[in-house]
Structure formats: C-alpha cells, structure tokens
Amino acid sequence: MIGYPGLAGRTIVVTGAAGGQGMREALQLSVLGANVIATDIAPTAPEDYDGTPVEYLPLDVADESGWRSLAAAVASRSAHPLRGLVNNAGITHRTRLGATARADWDRVFAVNVTGAMLGIQHLAPLMDVGSSIVNVGSVAALTAHYPAAYTSSKWALRGLTHVAATEYGPRGIRVNIVHPGFIDTPMTAGAPVMMRSTQLDLTPLERVGLADEVASVVTFLLSDAAGYVSGAEIPVDGGFSSTAGAKLLSDRLAHSALNDSPPADPALA
Ligand SMILES: NC(=O)c1ccc[n+]([C@@H]2O[C@H](COP(=O)([O-])OP(=O)(O)OC[C@H]3O[C@@H](n4cnc5c(N)ncnc54)[C@H](O)[C@@H]3O)[C@@H](O)[C@H]2O)c1
C-alpha cells in the first residue's frame, strides 16, 4: 500500500463496507489516517474490522431517509469535515434481458444508480474544495455483459459520474469511477464456474483481482495525489476491457502457429 497524501484526518464515507471491496477500502483508508465512516445495509459492524478504527453506521443506500440521517450526523462533526465519498455498494442479478423481472430490474437500479445519486445529492453539499467522490462501476459498464439489469445500471452510473464531475467541479470536488474486473469477493463467489473461467481466458493477466487492488486505486483517487483527476474512468481489470476479446484471437493464433507450417507468402501472415 502506498502512502497517498492528504488523507489523514479527512472524513470519508464508504458504502457497502461490511464486506468485499468496500471493507478493504475502509480499512486501507483508516490505516492511512482517514476518519472513515463505513456504512452497509447490515445492522451491525462486521467483526473483520478487527480493531482498525472504523466507525460503522448502518445505511441502505436506496433509502433516502437514511442518507438524510447520515448527512446530519456527518454535518455535526465540524472537527473532521467531510472530504470523500465512495459509492461502492452494489448488487448483481444474473439474468438475461428476456428473463429479467421488472422488480429485479428496479431493485438493481435502486441500489447501483439511485443509491449513488442520493449519496452525492446528500453529501456533496457538505464537501469543500479538495473533496473527492469515487463511484464503483464495473467492466460490465464498458461491455455487453449478459446480466441485463446489472450491466445497464453500471452504464447509468458512468453517466451519473460525468454529470456529477461537471456539476461539482467548479466547487473543487472531483468525481471519478473505477471499473473492477473479476475480483475475488463474496459477490463473485456465487458466479457460475463457466463465467469465472471464461473471464480469465479473456483477461491478459490471467488471474482474478483482489479487493485490495481495487481499494488502492480508490484510495489514490480520494487522495491529493489525484488532485487534477476528475471525470475519469479507470478499469482495474487485469487488462480485460482493453482487449475487447482480442486476447482470445491472439491466444488461438499463437496456439495454431505452434502447429501450423508458415504461409508460403509472408504477406499473408
Ligand atoms: N467483485 C467483482 O468482481 C466486481 C466486479 C465489478 C464491479 N464490482 C462492484 O464493486 C462493488 C463492490 O462489490 P463486491 O464484489 O465487494 O460485492 P460484495 O457483494 O462482496 O459486497 C457488496 C456490499 O454491499 C452491501 N450492500 C448491498 N446492498 C446494499 C444496500 N442497499 N445498501 C448498502 N449496502 C448494500 C452488501 O451488504 C455488501 O457488504 C459493487 O458496486 C460491485 O457492483 C464488483
């Protein structure tokens, strides 16, 4: 972990921080001296914070009254002004478009898009110059990943990110989005085996990512080291989104080259 500047003493809210990437983000930020308010839909703090000073407040990101209460609690602490928000909470629903029920579509959008929108609406007014908001998207937002509601919601989150970066930039608030690839967390533990193996076939680094590897990019974006970075989209995906499937072609050609004789005309190679 790198010691990024400007985090010590800053209050930063992280959503969905009871497990997975959100927990690693909360712990990394705390270790770097930030005053972390970790939130999650779970009523009590997870034991895994294990003595690291992370304050825990329950919050369902889809519930606007919860955001209102959180904003009031944060505003009352003038000693540690709010300087950061990580809209990390997210849910998936792995059905294709034709099989997606309206209720599931609405639920995914309520958490993945509306939750982030409410967070920005309620907490950005408490932020000052030098603050940073990080949304957690997905490589699904860069592709046509099959879970229809999830993919569509993450594309919407990209739009929200750019709108927010434009609207809040003049107040000195930066807004960015990271796009994790296949990361080892409870969310992907339930993914179909075929999805996992195919994802790895298409990922240049040929391994899954770690929650800490996403958290360290989020930490960078929250810090002053990223002071002139706003409206950016950063994949943290082992190269997955950069290949657009070309890795499969490359691998197959390399494999066939081992078996084939070279073409008579080198121009055909
Ligand atoms: N794991 C991956 O491979 C991957 C890939 C791309 C994007 N992402 C995104 O990264 C983020 C974190 O994912 P993760 O893998 O750590 O998932 P996870 O399921 O392990 O953790 C998500 C956390 O969000 C919480 N949560 C769910 N609904 C909530 C709500 N309504 N309000 C507040 N908290 C809620 C859960 O309780 C959980 O603690 C999500 O936005 C996800 O879409 C994950």
Image (cartoon, rainbow, N blue to C red):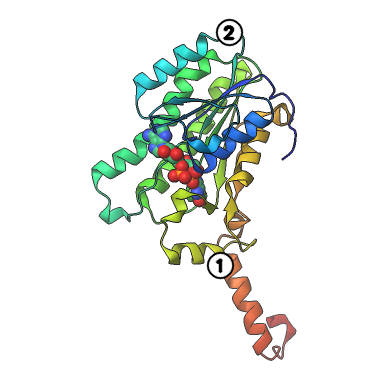
What's the residue at 60%, 13% (across, down)?
81
Q: Amino acid at mark 1?
A: Asp
Residue 200, x across and y down, in percent: 55, 64
**Which residue position is annotated with label 2?**
78
Q: Is residue 155 visible?
A: no
Residue 143, x across and y down, in percent: 49, 53
Q: Which is nearer the eye, 31 or 238?
A: 31
**C-alpha separation, residue under disc 1 versus residue under disc 2:** 50 Å
**Image height check: is 174 above or below 244?**
above
What's the residue at 50%, 35% (across, down)?
17
Q: Is residue 203 visible?
A: yes
Secondary structure beneath label 2: loop
What's the residue at 30%, 43% (across, down)?
105
Q: Which is nearer the eye, 141 or 57?
A: 57
The quarter of the rendered structure image containing the N terminus is top right
Q: Amino acid at mark 2?
A: Ser
The quarter of the rendered structure image containing the C terminus is bottom right
What's the residue at 68%, 82% (across, down)?
268
Secondary structure beneath label 1: helix
Q: Report which quarter residue 7 is drawn in.
A: top right
Residue 99, x across and y down, in percent: 26, 55
**Which residue position is annotated with label 1?**
201
Residue 48, x across and y down, in percent: 53, 38
**Image height check: is 205 above or below 73?**
below
